[in-house]
Image (cartoon, rainbow, N blue to C red):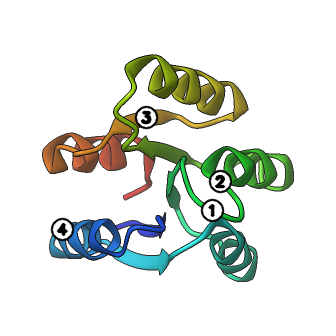
Amino acid sequence: MARILFIDDDVQTLDLFGQILEGAGHEVIRARDGVTGIALYRENPTDLIITDIMMPVKDGMEVINELKRDFPQAKIIAISGTDREVRREFFFDVSRILGAKRTFHKPIDPVELLQAIRDLAPD
């Protein structure tokens, strides 16, 4: 199964999806901010990164930009909980331009997320 770096400043999201992904057999490394997430990836790259877009200190778009610049092969899924559709679509468009392979709006359907992981991560 995949090693996944999950970056989100919301502890409940980290815990819930960490448990879901681990229950599906994946190894999950958790980070509560973009700075920590990037440092963890630099130390030991994972098969896949899931990052929230809206975070303090270093937001998800900065995370995607930096990781794709330094690790072009990195596979990234961007997620967002913003409730303003126009703003969310803008963030998702920019995330895809920067290199995110998939995007999801919170609340995330676990089945859809697991399918995206199967599509993107190696066996």
Which circle, 1 or 3, is nearer the viewer? 1
User: Residue sitting at 36 percent across and 37 percent down?
Assistant: 104
Location of residue 112 in the rendering, given as x and y in whole percent from the top left corner: 21, 40
Q: Residue at the location (51% across, 58% down)?
A: 48
Instruction: Please report contact status of discs 1 and 4: CB closer than 8 Å, yes or no.
Output: no
Q: Residues within 10 Å of mark 3 (few under 14, many from 20)?
A: many
Considering the image in quadrants, where does the N terminus appear? bottom left
**Marks 3 and 4, the one that precedes in the sequence:** 4
Cα separation between marks 3 and 4: 18 Å
Q: Kindly report the distance in space between the C-alpha atoms of the residues bearing marks 1 and 3.
A: 19 Å
Instruction: Report how far apart the C-alphas of labels 1 and 2 lie in the structure.
Output: 6 Å
**Label 2 close to label 4 by CB (< 8 Å):** no
Left or right for 109, reference 65: left
Q: Residues within 10 Å of mark 1 (few under 14, many from 20)?
A: few
Residue that badge 2 annotates: 59
Disc 3 target residue:
103
In the displayed structure, 3 sits above or below 69; it is below
Q: Earlier in the sequence, mark 3 or mark 2?
A: 2
Q: Amino acid at mark 2?
A: Asp
* The C terminus sits in image quarter: bottom left
- List the residue tagged with mark 1: 56
Q: How many marks?
A: 4
Q: CA distance from mark 3 to mark 2?
A: 15 Å
Residue type at mark 4 is Ile
